[in-house]
Image: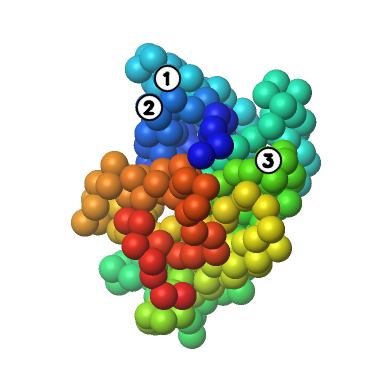
Amino acid sequence: MSKLELAVVTGANRGLGLEVSRQLAHKGLKVILTSRDTSKGQQAVRLLKEEGLAVYFHALDATDGASIDVLAQFIRAEFGRLDILVNNAGIFPDPVPWNTEASSSVFDTNIAILRQAMETNTFGPLLLCQRLIPLMDGFGRVVNVSSGMGQLAEMNGCCPGYRLSKTALNAVTRIFAEELQATGVKVNSVCPGWVRTDMGSEQAERSVQEGAAGIVGLATLPDDGPSGGFFRDMQLLSW
C-alpha cells in the first residue's frame, strides 16, 4: 500500500469531524482540521495537540471557492500534496421530525431551505473535490459523509432539504469515482449512522467514536479497496 500521510477534514471543530481528526492522527497521519469558526477550530486543535497528535488548523468556508483555493495553496506550499479528503462539513436545515412546533413535511418546505442544504451538503464537497483531488497526484482517498436519509432505496418522508442534498452528494461520489477509476484515487460515501452529536442530538443511538470509525476506515483503504460505493461500518449499502 502506498503511504497515506496528510488528511484534510472539513467541519472538524466538534462532533464527527473532531473525532475523525483524532482517529486519523492516532494512526500516524498529519491532519489539517478545518472549520469556518476560527476560534473554535483553534481550540479543537489545541485539544488534540495536548494528546500529542500532529494536527494543524486552517480556516475554511466549505461553500466558498476562494476559501477553498486558499486552503489548496496552503497545502501545496507547506506539504506538497494531499492524501485524504474527508468532506464532513454539513448542515441539517429542516425542522427536526420530533419538533411538533414546525413541520418537516415536503409540502411545507421553503425552497430557501433546499438551496441552503444543497449549497453546504452538496456543492461544498463538489468544490472541494474539484480543488483538492488534483493535489493527490493520482493517489488518495476521498470520503463524502452522507446519510441513510439520502438512500433512494429507503427514502421516507420529511426533511427534504437534508434528504435531497445527501442523495445528490451520493451522485457526486459516483461521478468522481467513475472519472477517477483509472487512477489510485478512491472516492466513497459513508453513512456514519445516527450519532450523538449536536446535529444528531442526545437521542441518537451511536457514539461519536462508533460513527467516526467507518469514516476513518474508508479514508485509509488499502490500494485494492473499493471506490464509488456507499458504506456504513465498512458494509456496502444500496443507493
**Which percent across, then down, holds residue 150?**
46, 71
Visible residue check, residue 45: no
Amino acid at pointer 3: Met
How far apart marks 2 and 1 lie (CA) works out to 7 Å
For the image, the number of numbered tags is 3
Location of mark 3 (residue): 136
Question: Looking at the image, is mark 1 or mark 3 earlier in the sequence?
Answer: 1
* Labels 1, 3: front one: 3
Residue 59 falls in which quadrant of the image? top right
Location of mark 2 (residue): 26
Question: Looking at the image, is mark 2 or mark 1 earlier in the sequence?
Answer: 2
- Residue at image x 69%, y 58%? 182
Amino acid at pointer 1: Leu
Q: Which mark is residue 53?
A: 1
Q: Residues within 10 Å of mark 1 (few under 14, many from 20)?
A: many
Q: Mark 2 falls on what kind of element?
A: helix
Mark 1 and 3 residues: CB-CB less than 8 Å, in contact? no
- In the displayed structure, does residue 25 sit left or right of residue 4? left
Visible residue check, residue 78: yes
Amino acid at pointer 2: His
How far apart marks 3 and 2 lie (CA) works out to 22 Å
Q: Nearer the viewer, residue 178 or 208?
A: 178
Q: Nearer the viewer, residue 7 or 42?
A: 7
**Which percent across, then down, holds residue 9?**
53, 39
- Residue at image x 73%, y 51%? 130
- In the displayed structure, does residue 120 sit left or right of residue 191? right
